[in-house]
Amino acid sequence: MKVDTIVPNFKGMARSRVEGERKATTQQAYLIGSFVAHNL
């Protein structure tokens, strides 16, 4: 019974972590792109 409650929670945590990392990398790429554009 414990496994049933832990597994979905773990899946949700992993998914949110992946989405957060994807957002962070997109934000970094955007910041670097705008920084480079400013310095051209």
Image (cartoon, rainbow, N blue to C red):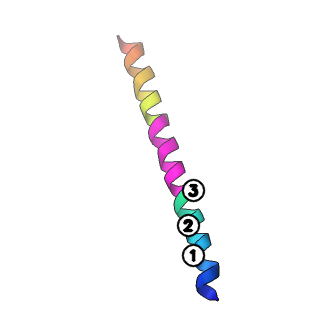
Tag 3: residue type?
Ser
Whether residue 24 is in magenta: the answer is yes
* Residue type highlighted by circle 1: Val
Q: Amino acid under label 2?
A: Lys
User: In the image, residue 1 lies at what x, y percent?
Assistant: 64, 89
Query: Residue at 54% across / 58% down in the picture?
Result: 15
Which image quadrant is residue 12 in?
bottom right
Q: Residues within 10 Å of mark 2 (few under 14, many from 20)?
A: few
Residue drawn 52% across and 56% down?
A: 17
Q: Nearer the viewer, mark 3 or mark 2?
A: 2
Of the residues tagged 3 and 1, which is closer to the observer? 1
Residue farthest to the bottom, as pictured: 1
Q: Secondary structure at mark 3?
A: helix
Label 2 near label 1: C-beta < 8 Å? yes
In the rendered image, which residue does mark 2 sit on? 11
19 over 26 or under it: above or below: below
Pick whichever, 40 or 2, lies toward us.
Answer: 2
Which residue is under mark 3? Answer: 16
Mark 3: give few (<14), some (14-19) or many (20+) Cα within 10 Å. Answer: few
Density class for disc 1 (Cα within 10 Å; few <14, some 14-19, many ≥20) is few
The numbered dot on residue 7 is 1
Q: Nearer the viewer, residue 33 or 3?
A: 3
Q: Secondary structure at mark 2?
A: helix
The part of the chain drawn in magenta is 16-26
